[in-house]
Image (cartoon, rainbow, N blue to C red):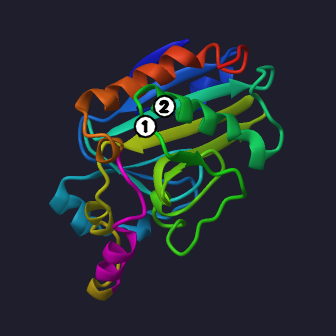
Amino acid sequence: MVQWRALADVEPFRQLPERHAVVRTVDHPTVVLGSTQSEALLAEAALAAAGVEMGRRRGGGGAVLLHPGDHLWVDAWIPRADPLWVADVAEAAHWVGAWWLAALGDVGLDGVQAHQGKAEPGTYGGSICFAGRGPGELFHLGAKVSGVSQWRSREGALFHTMAYRHWDVAPLVDLFEVDDVTRATWREDLAGAAVGIEDLKADQGAFAAVGDSLLASFMDWGFSAR
């Protein structure tokens, strides 16, 4: 089943016997922390000044900042009986990379590659999701195009997958509880860490088309040759 809904809890997935995809949207600016991140990382005054609310996903990794319409976030639930289920955590998201890669190819985006190795958070990945590298994530000339965060339970695995329309790290960095010198360094170091879909392909229709392609292929992915 494929469905569109607002950012919500993941617990209902555990009761689903078949794969399920949900496109997550927000109605207001929201910073989403990884499962192990402390809320103390963010400055309350900065959140209030920017009108940003705070949320948390069940998967690990760093923070992402969402504004209405600036991201494509697809949650993909894979139950243990599904052909896409893989017990090895390091290999479990490889299909996600192939799935997203095909969707980007459908809109004519070439030169994108999937990271197949182990997670490499690097200097900033523990703080900001799109600063690290993980299995199934896509990159263009070293800049992250799509991110993946995984949550596993005895019933299956949920993959949070996301790409930005445009990449601008400054609004996210400005929410962290760090001094001005550190903030300036983060801004400079992370300016090219990621890239948005429309930064690569200046076509507003391409962004929506990637989402359409992901949803159209999801239910059959892994059952038939692409």
**166 or 176: which is nearer to us?**
166
Residue 6 can be seen, yes or no: no
Where are the magenta residues, as a range? 182-196
Q: Is residue 90 left or right of residue 191?
A: right
Is residue 108 among the parts visible in the rendering?
Answer: yes
Asked if the residue at tag 1 contacts the one at tag 2, i.e. Cβ–Cβ closer than 8 Å, the answer is yes
Q: Is residue 87 magenta?
A: no
Q: Which residue is mark 1?
A: 109
Q: Please tell me in which quadrant of the rendered image residue 85 appears.
A: top right
Instruction: Residue 217 in the image: state x and y as whole percent.
Output: 55, 17
Tag shown at residue 105: 2
Mark 1 residue type: Leu
In the rendered view, would you say 38 is above or below 73? below
Q: Nearer the viewer, residue 87 or 145?
A: 145
Indicate whether 139 appears above or below 44. Answer: above
For the N terminus, the image quarter is top right
Q: Residue drawn at (30%, 41%), measured in percent from left and top? A: 198
